[in-house]
Amino acid sequence: MTTVLVVGGGATGTGVARDLALRDVDVTLVDRGGVSGGTSGRSHGVLHSGARYAESDPPGAEECIEENRILRSIAGDCVRETDGLFVGLSGDDPDYFEEKLAACKAVGIEADRLTPAAARERAPGLSADVERAMAVPDGVVFPSRLCAANAADAEAHGGTVRPHAPLEGLTVEGGRVTAATLGGAVDGTVGVDYVVNATGAWAGEVAAMAGVDVEMAPARGVMVAVEHDALADGPVLNRCRTPDDGDIVVPHGDQVVLGTTSVPVDDPEAYERADWEVERSIEECAAMLPPVAEAPVARSWWGVRPLYEPDEAGEDRRDISRGFFLLDHADGGVDNLLSVVGGKLTTYRRMAEAAADRVCDRLGVNADCRTADRKLPGADDAAELDVLVAEYDARSPTDEDVVAA
């Protein structure tokens, strides 16, 4: 028996488990694989400053910069403070650049205009075609470490984390989930008082087990890691244009991660992995950083964005909000099931806090969130974090070069 069962071991799920455990709530987290095995560990791993969303979604941008600052203070070697550049090339709209710069300042994101020469000093190899640049406080997230550290802190405060324990079914009686059937490492049935569905792109499948609908609109995207060490100490690069394929370059030591595409998928598990996406991402990123065009490819991987769209989604899912949503299924006839959908890796802690607040309200627990000012375990020791990665089987393609190193 557990008071709260959290399904999904990505950043949001492990964040919810940590938050609830710190409030002395009996919580168990399960995942079908190791933690960070889904979208969190298959992202490009950018710690967003919010600049990417400043003009299109000011509240979302403000959330990003606030969480960016919190993670820099609590997450240690789970993140890397690289800073970032938004660069406009000769064919890019200068008005869009000015709009973004003004929007950043309006929501409190530190954004400084740079000359092209100053930008190239910060990012060796940056294209001579760069005409405009601004510096912003972007960074890099290592999701394997982040998820493992959240899981470890949940267990350190009385929670239980069970990787390789897939949810196989939910028993609903009298409008409530009463039990969860788990396979793998658990292979049994667990009684529950409350369930949090934090399975990202798979949220619809878990909700269906309880007889309720969650209308997801997942989109796949490719990431390509290439050998390129000239940006080892450099910033995240963002193309300053309306979001499109191949507009982010993320420094990873001796490599850079190039991304990404956005292609609608019907099934977050079974989808095409097309060569053209790899080729397009490299080609477009090379417009910002020409040396990557011929750089050896170290690995490539696809992730599926957990986009939530209750109405029919169009072909271009980049237009769907990157904000997060709490879906309390009491409205659908299941009183003790909450789905957390949408959102971004950068704002996982805020998503977890909102979910934990809702759960505590429903359970009658009077306790405040404590995750914003408590350092994650191992945060100041990369080697200790990597021990936790192994313990929770949290290895993922986003940061396997860093964690393996």
Image (cartoon, rainbow, N blue to C red):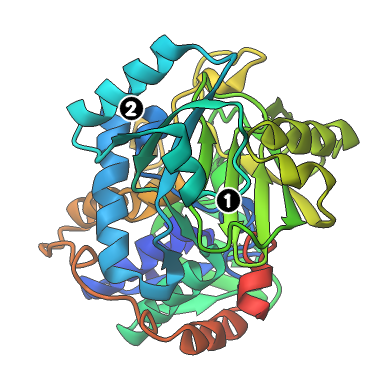
Three-letter amino acid code at disc 2? Ala
Residue 5 x/y as whole percent: 44, 64
Q: Of the residues under marks 1 and 2, which one precedes in the sequence?
A: 2
Q: Nearer the viewer, residue 27 or 311?
A: 311
Instruction: State whether residue 332 appears in this view.
Output: no
Look at the numbered disc 2 and give the secondary structure of its residue. loop
Q: Is residue 236 left or right of residue 247?
A: left
Q: Is residue 38 above or below residue 403?
A: above
Residue 381 x/y as whole percent: 42, 86
Q: Is residue 363 left or right of residue 255?
A: left
Residue 199 x/y as whole percent: 55, 50
Three-letter amino acid code at disc 1? Pro
Q: How many marks on residues?
A: 2
Residue 193 x/y as whole percent: 36, 61
- Quadrant the C terminus occupies: bottom right
Look at the numbered disc 1 and give the secondary structure of its residue. loop
Q: Is residue 366 above or below residue 164?
A: above
Neighbour class for label 1 at 10 Å: few (<14), some, many (≥20)? some
| Disc nearest the viewer among 1 and 2 | 1
- Residue drawn 67% across and 69% down? 400
Q: Nearer the viewer, residue 140 or 186?
A: 140
Identify the image quadrant of residue 113. top left
Q: Which residue is mark 1?
A: 124
Identify the image quadrant of residue 378. bottom left
- Residue drawn 74% across and 29% down? 266
Q: Which residue is mark 2?
A: 54
